[in-house]
């Protein structure tokens, strides 16, 4: 695992070499042609498609031609990584986008950030603590809720299967200030989801997370009400 500093040095070297060799020209020219056509929708779809395909050369091209940092390139790339494991679970495109200055908190069209995707993978353990750490270190909004009303923590806590990686992600999110008492649109909370899923698939690792939230709830004036009134929900 490369540190942020090591990754930045590698990206700077690739940027310099790529500019000298013309490695980014194809992507730059494609993006500039779409911009010239004047169709913002086509431009968005073109860039989104390349991020979904995890084209690192497209990241450098986006940086070179000045594609705005607020565009959700990181969220688009994360959609791909949530679906496909790639080579050893690499998240190189996401890390390169972070280096390039793109906003990790910019949501996709479903209102989800890359953080939501990285705690809800469709392969392996179902989450990627390394990606979660990088996103949080880059300032991704830990309490952003997608269109369904779930924060990344709510999404994580809805996993029926629970592993050490889930506990690691839980700790990372909590340490970054995730609201342990967040309430989704359907009334579910992290605690209610953890309890519900643990009833289906008991896990000592998940019980640690349950105990951690209960301990925090006991410290609050609203703790008793939250413990008594938390809604349940079945999440796949």
Image (tube, rainbow, N blue to C red):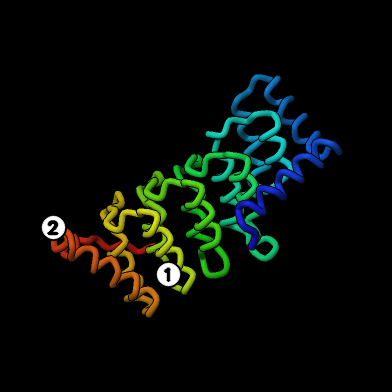
> In which quadrant of the rendered view does residue 214 lie?
bottom left
- Camera sees residue 5: yes
Residue 33 falls left or right of residue 234: right
**Image coords of residue 163 (percent x, y):** 46, 74
Q: Quadrant of the N terminus?
A: bottom right
**Image coords of residue 126 (percent x, y):** 51, 65
Q: Which residue is drawn at the image coordinates 27% and 63% (left, top)? A: 232
Q: Which residue is drawn at the image coordinates 18% and 65% (left, top)? A: 218
Secondary structure at numbered mark 1: helix
Residue identifier under label 2: 221
**Image coords of residue 205 (percent x, y):** 40, 76
Residue identifier under label 1: 167
Secondary structure at numbered mark 2: loop
- Disc on the earlier residue, 2 or 1: 1
Residue 24 falls left or right of residue 59: right
Specify few, some or many for label 1: CA neighbours under 10 Å numbering under 14, 14-19, or 20 or more: many
- Camera sees residue 195: no
Q: Which residue is drawn at the image coordinates 35% and 64% (left, top)? A: 234
Residue 170 falls left or right of residue 5: left
Which disc is residue 34 wearing?
Answer: none
Instruction: Say if 144 sits above or below 34 in the image.
Output: below
> In which quadrant of the rendered view does residue 187 lie?
bottom left
């Amino acid at each position: 695992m490369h540190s942020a500093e090591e990754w930045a040095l590698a990206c700077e070297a690739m940027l310099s070499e790529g500019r000298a060799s013309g490695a980014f020209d194809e992507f730059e020219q494609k993006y500039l042609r779409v911009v010239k056509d004047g169709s913002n929708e086509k431009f968005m779809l073109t860039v989104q498609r390349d991020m979904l395909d995890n084209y690192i050369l497209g990241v450098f091209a986006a940086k070179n031609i000045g594609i705005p940092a607020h565009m959700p390139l990181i969220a688009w790339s994360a959609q791909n990584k949530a679906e496909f494991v790639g080579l050893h679970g690499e998240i190189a495109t996401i890390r390169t986008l972070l280096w390039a200055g793109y906003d990790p908190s910019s949501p996709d069209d479903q209102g989800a950030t890359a953080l939501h995707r990285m705690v809800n993978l469709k392969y392996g353990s179902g989450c990627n603590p390394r990606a979660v750490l990088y996103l949080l270190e880059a300032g991704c909004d830990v309490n952003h809720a997608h269109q369904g009303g779930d924060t990344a923590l709510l999404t994580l806590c809805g996993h029926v299967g629970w592993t050490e990686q889930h506990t690691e992600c839980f700790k990372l999110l909590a340490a970054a200030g995730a609201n342990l008492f967040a309430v989704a649109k359907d009334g579910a909370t992290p605690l209610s989801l953890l309890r519900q899923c643990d009833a289906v698939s008991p896990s000592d690792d998940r019980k640690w997370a349950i105990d951690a939230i209960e301990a925090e709830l006991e410290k609050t004036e609203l703790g008793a009400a939250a413990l008594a009134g938390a809604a349940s929900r079945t999440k796949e």
